[in-house]
């Protein structure tokens, strides 16, 4: 009987849609799936489920060298492919599918492909097996392996590779397939322009050696942009696009000036990208950039970029800059940053309904020391954001403004929807918006003893663990003499109904008053140390920070320490639990200007965006 796959019984449930067909129905006119790829149909997400963003798991694994399958798994996959390529039977197809349909393709694919390529198998049959999995399978792992098999055979099935690679979950595999084929650079370029997350990172990195002027220019003006972190691609694009040479010109256009600022501001941050010292042209590029931007009036976007570079110039670690030149660069940056029009534009921008413009205005206002309280208050009062800027308003609140802020919170937050009783909820699902808004208050009320007890009382009865922990911690920081008369009774009632032993113990410690704050925090550090020494180191660093900042940052770590899930499987599993409490890393990162100004504030991130942006940050703590 002739070899063919169209006669075998599909080894999967035929009622499940093929991922390939699912994607074909969702393409935009520009050949992309948009900036937010759709959730794939092979996983049904339950409410409160923390998930990896598209391509995040494979992206982190590839970048940091984790996720390797055993030699037995590799051998089994190679054997299954070889048997199916020699004789097409339903049993052999099912055997291969059972091996490659489980999550973890990245762990075995490189090893398996090396052996398969050397097994002298019929290339047409390999391509057919690859297309069968890539275009018909209903689960992502099988599709990934199918793309990998397609990449072994020339000429490349470009249409299939581009269709699947347009979703960030599959871009890595499509990029590798394209890289291994003749004429693959143009395919990679097409792919890179279609994706925005980890897929952009995977494709642009593989274009690093291009000599194509069109691609080089694109890398300078667009290629570095991605929805994860610009730091991943900034240096690659600066070097491949020959940024220093472009900036050495007497004049450059506005687009290149803006892009150069974003690239250089990302390079000087370094991690998770290369260190600034690894870019040999950094100093002349900064010098020329400041010359070009200095010839412009300057936008708030420019201000954000120059501010990042100026912070680096305060202490250019590992980069040698002669003192006279360093002083000149600082002076040029300071002259630009102190221009008269920036304060007015920043103040006006605080009321701009556009999220990007608002973010740039907020960052600039912070750099210039502008008191943003009144504008932030008005922004919330006018409901200019889908999610109000409570975090920023409360950071700008002092004792003289506290009652005004509290009254606004009472008026705008649906407090009645919150005190439904304790549960293990994280608070990420739809319907938990009021709980998230309350959390901003609970984090700050620790520094205002005796004020806002009604909000703390609501937090004690919240279904979200983070609300309850943060409400308890606020009371822990209040001297007992300012506790309201019913505070002790409220804690007792909470303890009686609390569903988590760790939260109940914490509440009991605070009620008894015999466990100092530092000892309570020490317990959290101990729990962290049991899971990951590097997380414990970070917790100790936070414990040493000024109390106000620490109290704003520790709620997430409390949630981490009280998480019931596994902590010792892989770095990304440890990182994943942080998505429920990103206050420490996100707030510190955001306040230091380390999130690019054209990204939405962390409060507005979707669940997948939060996972995608958090995991690289957490990975720096866990494995590097």
Image (cartoon, rainbow, N blue to C red):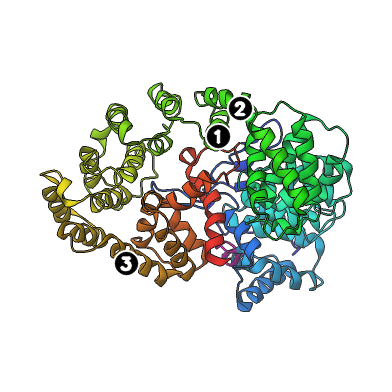
| Secondary structure under the numbered disc 3 in the rendered image | helix
- What's the mark number on residue 606? none
The single residue placed furthest to the bottom in the displayed view is: 72
Q: Is residue 100 magenta?
A: yes
Q: Position of residue 190 (x, y in %)?
A: 77, 42
- Of residues 382 and 616, the one nearer the viewer is 382
Q: Which callout, 3 or 2, points to the residue nearer the camera? A: 2
Secondary structure beneath dot 1 equals: helix
Percent coordinates x, y for residue 447 in the rendering: 31, 45
Q: Dividing the picture into quarters, in which one does residue 92 lie?
A: bottom right
CA gap between label 2 and label 1 equals: 9 Å
User: Looking at this view, is 173 or 244 the one in front?
Assistant: 244
Q: Whole-percent x and y of residue 191?
A: 74, 45
Write down the residue under mark 1.
Answer: 368
**Label 1 crowding class (10 Å Cα cut-off): few <14, some 14-19, many 20+?**
some
Please give the label number shown on residue 523: 3
**Image: magenta residue range:** 97-104
The local secondary structure at tag 2 comes to helix
- The mark nearer the N terminus, 3 or 1, is 1
Question: Cβ–Cβ below 8 Å for labels 3 and 1?
Answer: no
527 and 449: which is toward the camera:
449
User: Could one spot residue 17 in this view of the protein?
Assistant: yes
Residue at which label 2 appears: 342
Q: Residue furthest front?
A: 324
């Amino acid at each position: 009987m002739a070899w063919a796959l169209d006669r075998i019984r599909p080894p999967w449930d035929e009622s499940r849609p093929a991922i390939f067909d699912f994607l074909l129905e969702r393409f935009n006119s520009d050949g992309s799936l948009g900036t937010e790829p759709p959730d794939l149909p092979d996983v049904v997400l339950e409410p409160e489920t923390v998930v990896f963003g598209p391509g995040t798991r494979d992206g982190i694994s590839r970048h940091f060298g984790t996720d390797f399958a055993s030699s037995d798994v590799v051998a089994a996959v190679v054997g299954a492919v070889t048997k199916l390529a020699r004789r097409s039977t339903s049993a052999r197809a099912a055997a291969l599918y059972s091996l490659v349909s489980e999550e973890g393709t990245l762990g075995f694919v490189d090893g398996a492909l090396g052996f398969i390529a050397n097994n002298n198998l019929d290339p047409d049959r390999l391509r057919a097996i690859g297309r069968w999995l890539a275009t018909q399978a209903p689960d992502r792992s099988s599709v990934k392996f199918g793309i990998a098999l397609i990449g072994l055979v020339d000429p490349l099935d470009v249409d299939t590779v581009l269709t699947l690679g347009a979703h960030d979950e599959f871009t890595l595999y499509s990029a590798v397939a394209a890289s291994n084929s003749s004429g693959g650079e143009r395919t990679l370029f097409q792919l890179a322009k279609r994706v925005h997350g980890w897929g952009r990172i995977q494709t642009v990195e593989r274009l690093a050696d291009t000599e194509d002027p069109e691609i080089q220019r694109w890398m300078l003006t667009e290629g570095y942009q991605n929805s994860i972190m610009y730091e991943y691609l900034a240096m690659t694009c600066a070097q491949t696009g020959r940024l220093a040479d472009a900036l050495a010109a007497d004049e450059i256009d506005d687009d290149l000036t803006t892009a150069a600022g974003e690239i250089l501001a990302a390079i000087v941050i370094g991690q998770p990208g290369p260190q600034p010292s690894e870019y040999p042209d950094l100093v002349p590029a900064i010098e020329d950039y400041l010359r070009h931007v200095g010839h412009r009036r300057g936008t708030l976007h420019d201000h954000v970029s120059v501010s990042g570079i100026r912070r680096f110039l305060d202490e250019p670690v590992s980069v040698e800059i002669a003192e006279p030149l360093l002083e000149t660069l600082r002076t040029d940056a300071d002259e630009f940053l102190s221009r008269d029009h920036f304060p007015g534009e920043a103040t006006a921008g605080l009321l701009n309904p556009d999220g990007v413009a608002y973010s740039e205005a907020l960052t600039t206002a912070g750099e210039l020391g502008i008191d943003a309280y009144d504008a932030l208050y008005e922004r919330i009062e006018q409901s200019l954001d889908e999610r109000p800027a409570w975090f920023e308003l409360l950071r700008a609140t002092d004792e003289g403004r506290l009652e005004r802020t509290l009254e606004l919170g009472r008026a705008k937050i649906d407090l009645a929807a919150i005190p439904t009783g304790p549960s293990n909820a994280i608070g990420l699902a739809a319907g938990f918006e009021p709980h998230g808004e309350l959390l901003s208050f609970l984090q700050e009320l620790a520094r205002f003893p005796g004020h806002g007890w009604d909000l703390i009382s609501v937090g004690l009865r919240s279904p979200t663990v983070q609300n309850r922990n943060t409400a308890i911690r606020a009371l822990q920081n209040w001297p007992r003499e300012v506790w309201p008369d019913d505070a002790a009774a409220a804690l007792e009632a909470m303890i009686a109904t609390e569903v988590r032993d760790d939260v109940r113990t914490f509440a009991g410690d605070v009620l008894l008053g015999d466990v100092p704050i530092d000892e309570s925090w020490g317990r959290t550090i101990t729990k962290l140390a049991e899971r990951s020494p590097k997380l414990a180191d970070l917790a100790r660093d936070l414990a040493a920070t000024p109390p106000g900042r620490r109290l704003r940052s520790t709620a997430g770590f409390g949630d981490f320490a009280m998480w019931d899930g596994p902590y010792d499987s892989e770095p990304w599993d440890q990182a994943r639990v942080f998505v429920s409490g990103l206050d420490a890393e996100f707030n510190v990162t955001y306040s230091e200007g380390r999130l690019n100004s054209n990204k939405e504030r962390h409060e507005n991130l979707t669940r997948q965006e939060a996972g995608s942006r958090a995991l690289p940050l957490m990975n720096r703590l866990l494995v590097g």
